Image (spheres, grey):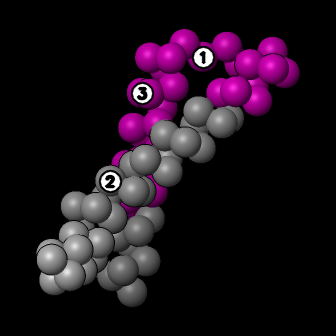
Amino acid sequence: MQKFLSELFSSDRLKSFLWRGGAVVVVAGLNYLSANIGEFNLSPQMVIFVALIVGEITKAVNNAVKSR
């Protein structure tokens, strides 16, 4: 069981999920702030779309850092 958990928490799939999940949280937070400010009024679908784009950007940055 310990080996399974160790492999699970060090897997690339989980790391990718966490990168993308973090991007969704950041974009959702920005949308919340902007909705309160009134400058941006993103629909929930646009929040998800932008989060996916940000996720890909963070993935590219992570890959660039790893390749150094």
Q: Could you tell me which quadrant the N terminus lies in? A: bottom left
The amino acid beneath tag 3 is Phe
Quadrant of residue 14 in the image?
bottom left
Quadrant of residue 31 in the image?
top right
Q: Position of residue 12 (x, y in %)?
A: 23, 68
Residue 49: mark: 3
- Give the residue at mark 2: 17
Residue 47 appears in the picture as rendered: yes
Q: Position of residue 2 (x, y in %)?
A: 20, 82
Q: Position of residue 62 (x, y in %)?
A: 41, 68
Mark 2: secondary structure: helix
Residues shaded magenta: 31-60
Within-10-Å neighbours for mark 1: few <14, some 14–19, many 20+: some
Q: Earlier in the sequence, mark 3 or mark 2?
A: 2
Find the residue positioned furthest to the front.
1
Taking depth in this image into account, of 45 and 14 the one nearest to the observer is 14
The amino acid beneath tag 2 is Phe
Taking depth in this image into account, of 31 and 60 the one nearest to the observer is 31
Does residue 41 appear left or right of residue 3 in this picture? right
| Residues marked 1 and 2 touching at CB (< 8 Å) | no
For residue 47: magenta? yes
**CA–CA distance in space, label 1 to label 2:** 23 Å
- Give the residue at mark 1: 42
For residue 46: magenta? yes
